[in-house]
Amino acid sequence: MRILEIRPMRGPNFWSIRRHKLIVMKLDLQEMEERPTDKIDGFLERLKSMFPSMYSHRCSEDHEGGFFKRVEEGTWMGHVIEHIALELQTLAGMDTGFGRTRGTGEHGVYHVVFSYIEEKAGVYAARASVRIAQALIDGTGYDLQNDIQQLREIREDERLGPSTGSIVEEAASRGIPWIRLNRHSLVQLGYGINQRRIQATIASTTSSIAVEIACDKEDTKNLLEAQSIPVPRGKIIRDEDGLKDAVEDLGYPLVIKPLNGNHGRGATINIVNWDQAVEALEIAKKISRSVIVEKYITGYDHRILVINYKFICAAQRKPAAVVGDGKSTIQQLVDAVNADPRRGYGHENVLTSIKIDEMTQNILEEKELTLQSVLKKGEELFLKRTANLSTGGTATDVTDIVHPYNVFMCERIARIIGLDICGIDIMTPDISEPLTETGGAVLEVNAAPGFRMHIGPTDGLPRNVAEPVVDMLYPPGSNYRIPIIAVTGTNGKTTTTRLIAHIAKTCGHKVGFTTTDGIYIQNQMLQRGDCTGPQSAEFVLKDPTVDFAVLETARGGILRAGLGFHRCDIAVVTNVAADHLGLKGINTLEEMSKVKAVVPESVQPNGYAILNADDELVSNMARNLDCKVAYFSLDENNPLIKRHCEDGGLAAILENGFVTICKGTWKLRVHKVINIPLTFSGKAVFMIQNILPAILSAFIRNFKIEDIRLALETFIPSPVQTPGRMNMFQFKKFNVMVDYAHNPAGFQAIARFLEKVDAKPKVGVIAGVGDRRDEDIIALGTLAAKMFDDIIIRQDRNLRGRTEQEIIDFMLDGIKAVDPTKPVKVIPLEKEAIDYAIKNGKKGSFIVICSDVIPDALDQIMKFKEKEDQFEMHPDDIPNQSNR
């Protein structure tokens, strides 16, 4: 078996609109295509032995053990690999269960699709599942535990931490979109101008000065002490001499911790002798040059969480510990504690397993114990010096017993420091009594406090502490989205996208849009190239200046990784025509329409899908939509349009020479076609198919008709506004048009325009596209022979898997099938082909250049135009300087 390709999906996709995180593995079963599972001796028994928990897989049988039944009856190895990949992730603490396996149309080649929690873990599971399946087939041994541990480590390295994850989950539950901005904990909530950011539990609203203060323990202590907040006595030191002075002044027990630190890193508590103090100093100096030595306050360690300056909850923390039973060794007691199903690797469970590290060994040495020592029954041994959950500590929720004075004090502390999200560490014998009466003290104020102890305490009530964070970032009535209009289809996407963006800009919006030629923010091109995939969409949605997004969304990006957004407000589908068939497992127009349908299927329930009523493949998409639908048509008598409008629906049509909005049976005429520059005085009928969905999108967004009309009048087809879309150049003897037409439907649209152009001869500079089907390349030649009097065949820069001669021969086959005598010249380089066409242009001719690299072609033609238009002064027009 051979893996041909692995593609992670990250948004709505061809395989599932709702399940965004999918691995799509293209797998060649090779000889295993002829060997289903019932033909492999002992396969089922070996599978059950390795994965007994797979009994829970129901498969299509819809009952436990259903998958094993399918294996017994005989199923293909791609199906088995799908289930192995899912179970591997589940065993590694990433419970996920969606999968499907489908043929690609090639013999023995399948798409194995399964869900993932963490992308890198999903990719690892894909490769591992093929290795495991092969071992099961061959009956050889396999180290499954190694794969499971590798996946656990990948999960811990890749996933959001518990605190960040809880905020993201709370935001997602409210429909707030989010984007991970790095591989750590920096996350964007919302889109564009309405975005907020979090990093762990620091928010974009958090004061940087407050964070600096909280990270400086001395500044924090001084500010609190000045405001009559009880804090421990202490000193700042840098070396052992300073430590000696501090010990003499403060006396034992002590706490030693870094001056600049958080989350308990480098801190040691309850130090009772000089050796412990020296060790603690060295530990703290690994974090910070300066170290705080404080009097150790006896009592229980409490963490108070304050969000948006309001008390939220409290937890009592306890370091990792074991309790003796009079017979078990310390190691056995640790193993017993770690056997608690609530404990796990890293952050996979509520509690973390206790790890025997250097700190633990030092504690044992101080107490003259080893891991083989036996504790007395009931004797408690603390294995860590700090009460962090990440080192095996425990937490008990005590929110409901915190004394009102302590609540008041903590809210005041948050204001003093200026932290809108802060964790306050308090040592006191009894949190239900005022701190002033128990002799307790405030030990620290922490920026970016961990939420894990609150959302999953060892004992007590879990608290949804992420809720007040999201409430703070997005108070009731706040907007977290920006309008998103996504445009897809075979032809017309770019022009439609640009026109919608122009209308929105005319109406006062700061628009970000993506096209096949680049990414634009407020009409400034920031990236050049084909930018119609999910990364380009995210680029726009990440921009904090954008309040309106228009995203051209092409087939390639959808199949490669899915959409770059989870939901859009309006989706436009221009058409579905024969192009890109035979690529990425999409072989028919019906399959291509399913790919394009991903975009309208992602529309919010109260949004609109705008569909071409003249294209049955497009209009049929309405059957599977859970949003509103509007249609457009060049035929006002289109039966679908008439029924839709009679039912009170929205539509845009061409009627009596006008582009018109139909609101139910009422007609709102927007503009006369001949007065819209994009239609070239009505000659470019196919451009009207781009205008209709654009004005319909604008109308749905409540733009005024007069503003839409003004935008149509000011959208001038040109190399600047519509590069590569019918860009006209008037030379003295002939005219030149540059267009991106590259498929049969595009050629047909140009042909209809040329029928209305009075010129002779009509010359075409054309090329075939290497990754298209043979018949598609031949069809271009056939159409070109009907459209043009003279033909120049050039080659694309990227031949996409074919030879130059192969493409030329297919083009010539198409041309000769129409007219064997048609004048044809082959000039492979596009630059040379354009040079030849212009330098040999005949008077009265019309030259159509179908370009592969639009910017280069436009630059080349404009240089010819500038040279022809060069201004030359006659000597008699030069002023005589001597007469001045």
Image: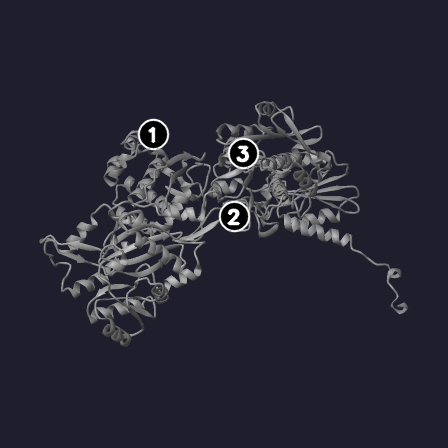
Nearer the N terminus, badge 3 or badge 2? 2
Mark 2 or 1, which is nearer the eye? Answer: 2
Spot occupied by residue 690 in the image (x, y as percentages of width and height)? 63, 36
Q: CA distance from mark 3 to mark 2?
A: 21 Å
Q: Which residue is denoted by mark 2 in the rendering? A: 192
Residue 779 in view, yes or no: no
Q: Which residue is mark 1?
A: 60
The vertical placement of 446 against 109, above or below, is below
Horizontal side, residue 1 vs residue 652: left or right: left
The location of residue 298, given as percent across then percent down, is: 22, 61
Q: Secondary structure at mark 2?
A: helix
Q: Amino acid at mark 2?
A: Gly
Mark 3 in CB contact with mark 2 (< 8 angstroms): no
> Quarter holding the C terminus?
bottom right
Instruction: Indicate the amino acid at tag 3.
Output: Tyr
Q: Is residue 755 visible?
A: yes
* Picture disc at residue 608: 3
Mark 1 / mark 3, whichever is N-terminal:
1
The alpha-carbon separation of the residues under discs 1 and 3 comes to: 35 Å
Q: Looking at the image, which residue is at 87% across and 63% down? A: 879
10 Å crowding of disc 3: few (<14), some (14-19), many (20+): many
